[in-house]
Image (spheres, rainbow, N blue to C red):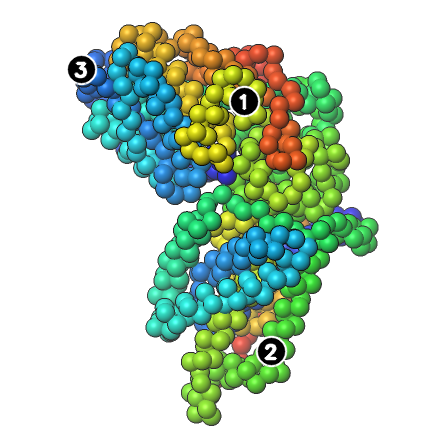
Amino acid sequence: MVKSRARLIAGTAAALSAALVMTGCGSKSSDGDTAAGSSGSSCVDTSGDTVKLGFLNSMSGAMSISEKTVSDSLNLAAEQINDAGGILGKKIEPIQEDGASEPTVFAEKAEKLIQSDCVAAVFGGWTSSSRVAMRPVFKSLNNILFYPVQYEGLEADHNIFYTGATTNQQIIPALDFLRTEKKIKSIFLAGSDYVFPRTANKIIKQYCEEYGIKVVGEEYQPLDQGAWGTAVDKIVSTKPDVVFNTINGDSNVAFLQAYDDKGLNSSNAPIVSVSIAEEEAAAIPVDLTGQMTSWNYYQTVESPENAAFVKAFKAKFGEKRVTSDPMEAAYTSMFLYKAMVEKAGSFDTEKVIGAADGITYAAPEGKVTVNGENHHIAKTNLIGQVQPDKLIKTIFSSDGPIEPDPFLKTYSWWDPSKE
Amino acid sequence: MDVVISQTFTGASYGATLLLVALGLTLTFGQMGVINMAHGEFLMAGAYSAYMTQQLITNADISIIFALPFAFIVAGLLGLLLEVLVISRMYHRTLDTLLVTFGVSLVLQQAAKDIFGAQAKAVKAPSWLHGQIPIFGYRYPLTQLFILVLSIACVIGLTSLLKYTGFGRQIRATVQNRDLAETVGVSTRSIDRLTFFIGSGLAGVAGVAVTLITATESTMGQEYIIWAFLVVVAGGIGQIKGAVIAAFALGITRAFLTYWTDGSMAVVLTFLLVVVFLQVRPQGLFATRTRSLA
């Protein structure tokens, strides 16, 4: 469940562990803060002909199925960069650590990578809870994290670069598509019960209020429960123009089975999903043909860059492997880092961050540009449609790359304080 | 009125699934007093058996027919193995059994992940279960009807087995008074093993049914295990008719609460209702009368 577990974040446990980590690191932040910016405190050693970079992905536990794929694409990127001469003439020496699907372990390993291994930057993390747990570590030790997964937005950290989509690059473009192309008048919201779907649905409801779209239902199930029968009964009786699906994990299978059981399909009740990618689609034993998705990358994207990426990936890891949105975002992040370092002429954290603004890269998904202010990247939104073979084809794309706006400041209808 | 009908049927579907999972527990937990936390993983083994059957017999229309007995045997054998190797050494040590079987459940989950991968497997439903039949104006899904019929068939089968066969009498005799049963020549050890085999096998059958409504993956049993224990406890330990009533009551309650509140709140409220019910009636709907407990 590549994407799905993506944000298996959740709820309380995650918040709790995150809070623990934050308090844990709070005590250390004082000496970290004084060190911030002063290059003398960093133990990064680039006097030789290599530079160490940390890869921090869950190689064990529930998230490993997803995060191993990110580690693979990071290794591919490092290999390609090394073959082309490295960064500032220095070969990348990757140091892999296992986040073990535990936010607290992510924080510990991030600290280890920065303090013991003296890496210049770290690539990884997947769940929002892992990112939130690592955030204070990167702040206090003044290092850089490249985070490759789309998420719920409302964040912009000095020490983090977000190369996955924020909500105005995934959720809002999907709504624009539904409103202008599909002319929907009513919408039904179905999601798993934790921070990402709740935040996404809050945004969707304010959007719908602005544009006069009627929200005819809003249903949640806990992540580990799949009792979607009642919610699907409500979809049958309310007959929405579209169902906006923010369900995560295997609960999606149960939802779509109940959907199919009760006679619903893409022609009488179309769905737009933001957590179903190629791999998830293959694991769902019902016909999904015609159902829609919103992402920034599909394996089927037609561009020379993507053809080269898919070919290189399959050559290295096997013909049967597929490439997904977070994998592509991770791959892209390493090339963005390379460009930032080369522009800065240094591996120093502050110099690299200072050089970030305006860095562009012709990524497999299309051209991306780093926003130096909020540390997200401008990327193109792609509405996809599931094909009979469960691959996803682009049916609509945004008008070029969308500027990242994690706090939705440019959307007048958005009021974060409103419930 | 539409809502009453639709949620009664949807709730009955939840209930039928719970009943199927809980039925094996009425034997192993109810009759034998073993708290087997790995029961959910036997269900998972049953679901993967359905997947493997479908790899061999690719025609989904008939593979389910073979999957049911195959899953029964696979899960039953896993149960038998657990009984012989672990549980038989810790009868009358309830807490130890709970911890050990919890450990076994984690081992089985990891084993499934290693063998089949963490990504869920797609088990196709037979085409003859595709569609709905109208009942009182509600379009009742055939898959749900199938699970309902299967659970009722298992209840009838298990009840007849316990009531009318010599083996069933031996089980009941062992539960009611182990010493006396031994004195009249019942081999209580082999009865224990067989009971555990059947109880675990029923979890396997439930696993096949569950592939029709949810993802086949390593942690799938966790969704059902707590509910199944609730059904057995609320129904009265070891009571099949109690389990039947409790399963449908829980399922229908959950459906209506989901309709009025939301999915998460419905789970909380349903659990709360069970707690309140057990405060009022700690022995559950029906009490087991045995001499050995005295």
Q: Which mark lies nearer to you, 2 or 1?
A: 1
Q: Do the residues labelled 2 and 3 touch (CB within 8 Å)?
A: no
Residue that appears at 60% across and 29% down: A392
Label 1: element kind: loop
Q: Is residue B159 visible?
A: yes
Letter of the chain that mark 2 sits on in the rendering: B
Discs 2 and 1 carry the same chain letter: no
Q: Which mark lies nearer to you, 1 or 3?
A: 3
Q: In what quadrant of the picture does the C terminus of chain A appear?
A: top right
| Residue hosting label 3 | A47
Q: Is residue B6 visible?
A: no
Q: Residues within 10 Å of mark 3 (few under 14, many from 20)?
A: few
| Front-lying residue, B275 or B248 | B248
Name the outermost residue toward the bottom.
B184
| Residue hosting label 2 | B161
| Front-lying residue, A148 or B32 | A148
Residue that appears at 59% across and 21% down: A382
| Front-lying residue, B71 or A21 | B71
Residue that appears at 53% across and 23% down: A297
Query: Which comes before the other along the chain, label 1 or label 3?
Result: 3
Q: In this view, does A12 lie above or below B25?
A: above
Q: Residue B117's spot in the image, x, y percent? A: 46, 46
Q: Is residue A54 left or right of residue A157?
A: left
| Residue hosting label 1 | A296
Going by the numbered disc 1, the residue's amino acid type is Asn
| Front-lying residue, B13 or A327 | A327
Discs 2 and 3 carry the same chain letter: no
Alpha-carbon span between mark 2 and mark 1: 58 Å
Going by the numbered disc 3, the residue's amino acid type is Ser
